[in-house]
Image: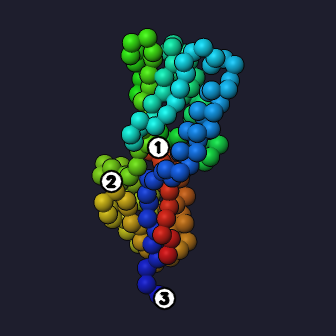
Amino acid sequence: MASDSSFDVVSKVDRQEVDNALNQAAKEVSQRFDFKGTDARIAWSGEAVEMQAVSEERVKAVLDVFRSKLARRKVDLKSLEADEPRQSGKLWKITARTVEGISQENAKKISKLIRDEGPKGVKAQVQGDELRVSGKSRDDLQAVQRLIREAEYDFAVQFVNYR
């Protein structure tokens, strides 16, 4: 048989899709009747997304609109980390960031799952903020992907470089 097959487990966010979702949310917030007169806004603030409105409920509603647009554009909501609403002068604000990369701790959780419950002969090694999984059989690798999907981690995972 040929050499080992492999794939990478990563946690990445398509910045263009997030930008499109933000633009759609901004348009909806500016046009919706229930946001009139609430000074509701959503925009980029550096690498973070800044939402604001005159009340805590309205700023949470802006966040819900943004989340729905992200979900519609198939961006995993686990990759969005939003702060609690805070008051800033007369306005309430929420800052949200996209989280990318698998931390060392989370990579260890995944590799432990593969070691304990995965097929024999499948190896996992941490490479920076990703995890390389390799094995002789492609069927074994597909079983590992299924195992990781079913594990329901609190961070987004994707599979890339399947060879």
Instruction: From the image, tell me which residue sits under label 2.
Output: 108
Residue 104 in percent (x, y) is at 30, 52
Which corner quadrant of the image does residue 125 belong to? bottom left
Query: Tag 3 or tag 2, which sits nearer the N-term?
Result: 3
What amino acid type should be assigned to the residue bearing mark 1? Ser
Q: CA distance from mark 2 to mark 3?
A: 30 Å
Q: Residue at x 46, y 37 (%)?
A: 44
Q: Residue at x 47, y 87 (%)?
A: 2
Query: Tag 2 or tag 1, which sits nearer the N-term?
Result: 1
Residue 119 appears in the figure: no
113 to the left or right of 147: left
Nearest to the observer: residue 106 or residue 33: 33
Instruction: From the image, tell me which residue sits under label 3.
Output: 1
34 to the left or right of 13: right
| Relative to 42, residue 77 above or below | below
Circle 3 or circle 1, nearest the eye: 1
Residue 99 in percent (x, y) is at 41, 44
What amino acid type should be assigned to the residue bearing mark 3? Met
| Relative to 112, residue 76 above or below | above
Q: Secondary structure at mark 1?
A: helix
The chosen color scheme is rainbow
User: Which disc is residue 79 wearing?
Assistant: 1
